[in-house]
Amino acid sequence: MTKKNAALVEVLQTSVEAQIAGRSLWKDARIRFFRNKAAVISLVVLTLVALACAFGPMVLPHSYEDTDWNAMGIGPSFHDWHLFGTDELGRDLLVRTLIGGRISLVIGLLATIASVSVGIVWGATAGFIGGKVDSVMMRVVDMLYAIPYLLIAILMVTIFGRNFSLVVLTISIFSWMDMARVVRGQTLSIKSKEFIEAARAIGVPTWRIIFQHVVPNLLGIVVIYTTVTVPGVILTESVLSFLGLGVQEPMTSWGVLIEDGTNVMAATPWMILFPGAALSITLYCANYIGDGLRDALDPKDR
Amino acid sequence: MPDSNIILSVKSLKVHFKVKDAKGWPWTPAKTLKAVDGVSFDLRAGETLGVVGESGCGKSTLARGVLNLIHPTEGEVVWLGQRMDSKDAVAWQHARKDMQMIFQDPLASLNPRMTIGQIIAEPLRVHYPELSMTQVMEKVRAVMKEVGLTEQQINRYPHEFSGGQCQRIGIARALILEPKLIICDEPVSALDVSIQAQIVNLLKDLQKRKGLALIFIAHDLAVVKHISDRILVMYLGKEMELAEKHALYDKPSHPYTRALLSAIPIPDPQLEKHKVIQLLQGDLPSPINPPSGCVFRTRCPQAASVCAEKLPDLKVVTEDTQSSCLFS
């Protein structure tokens, strides 16, 4: 009887294990990500915001630059579809928020991708190779820190004129250093782990150790730091725009709209309320998605 | 002894580290920590060399020095008759196909973000990139079976395994290239006793089947006795005694070896009660500032004044035994 039971248990075990066997890391991560309610809701909301920004201005009856002479500085109303109201020049705030969202989201995305990729490669290389290479690479980072980015932004605008890609470039150049430092620090701690030594004993080439063993283990901290970078980048863009170095009127971005709204906060509060809400919702969603991704991609956390 | 069988020969290997004194000035010259200070031994194909010694005596550093994971300060490593230059990356890359290592902490030595299959396949991918995915996986499955893992576990992650299983994974990774030598750096000290026996027996069994040579580092003398053919006793980075297993356990010639052996528990309460442990006085001296002459003299029960003056070398005592004690 016990023998039979043991055999049965074994058969069951093999069949169960065979089912488990097929899952890859990404499939696993996806399943775990979709179990996280906050992250899924955030993903849905962020997608809606992005879709609205992309297609909303085409659907809505107003344009972001034309003045509605009948409705200047009015609050939110269903009359004539000024759902978010208008600014003091009579431009529809809903359309302007969506148009501004395009700029802010694209800049947030591009500059973050640039900062994350440069930061990871730079930080991981410096931290892993160490010694003189590390010193030189990190002193370069220190030097970049010492340069005031506004000065460079002004210089670049003076030389090349105002355009969108220049804004992305300027922000990217000055936003990867934090990531590089964080990644380097984490790399130093991963470097001393035994599995790195095991890889070296096997004879794995250095670049392969960095990208196969170090970088995947940085993922948690990188994802967290990215969720901090996204808002930082969007806010930097608003500072540049405010100083007249970013996008040019009548083109707008969330940062610009918020700056405009701040000036007239007492008289027309909706002018800061709606762009501010759009920015906050986006940032909240980015944070929750970041949390969800971190948990989903960590195989130890099941 | 037929010398043609020797696959690895280590000649007065020294691994020294520079240590900055934290309290010193920036221009204070760095002190030298002699982690391994002139160790020599030969290893024949299919043989097991046990390395024992207390914590901090340089066992692990010796292993890393032999494998060139830490560049040795002096001395040479001759692998398959070829003198290995520690700076020659190409030669080492080639040699690593045949020399592998197993680590002390089974879980920490596996990348937590890779599946077992990827981990075991990695040496193949690095050294034989021309193999196809199916060939690699076939090999991985075969080697997993060999170390007692089931095929179904191939897509799991290291943290889902117990310590003993993780060590089996480590062994599988070391075995997949069919090396001639595996250096085991305290492979069982992180495992509980029943698992230790499994792993040691697995290693012994694999060695018999594949003709592997092993360098087995441990501080458990009973385990070392079980697996080794010859044993190297280290103290403060130096060799104390190098002897055939039976000669060492029956007639230890160095006072340090005698002290170590007297500390082995006897699995008989009656005998254990009346056993006399030859306790060593004092602590391990600092390897930054080792005693003059024989490094063991500060704790040696037989030490005489000559021990402080003369630097003893490893000398042949009997056919099976070499000892570095002046009095043996």
Image (cartoon, grey):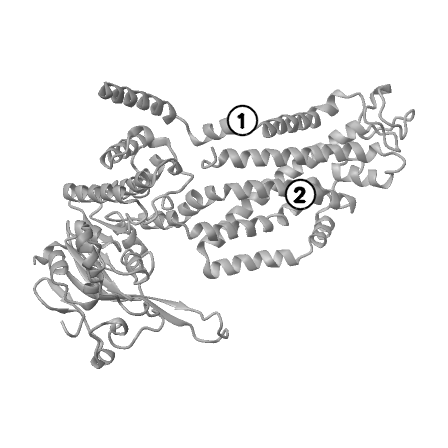
Q: Which residue is mark 2?
A: A233
Residue located 48% across and 75% down the image: B27
* Res A65 quadrant in image: top right
* Same chain shared by disc 1 and disc 2: yes
Choose the circle earlier in sequence order: 1 or 2.
1
| Chain letter of the residue beneath label 2 in the structure image | A
Which quadrant of the figure contains the C terminus of chain B? bottom left
Question: In the displayed structure, would residue A185 be above or below residue A290?
Answer: below
> Element at badge 1?
helix
Q: What x and y, as percent, mark residue B163?
A: 33, 41
Which mark, by number, is residue A174?
A: none
Q: Nearer the viewer, residue B146 or A177?
A: B146
* Amino acid type shown at disc 2: Val
Of tags 1 and 2, the one toward the viewer is: 1
Q: Which residue is mark 1?
A: A35
Q: Is residue A119 visible?
A: yes
Cα separation, mark 1 vs mark 2, equals: 29 Å
Left/right placement of residue A206 relative to residue B193 reads right
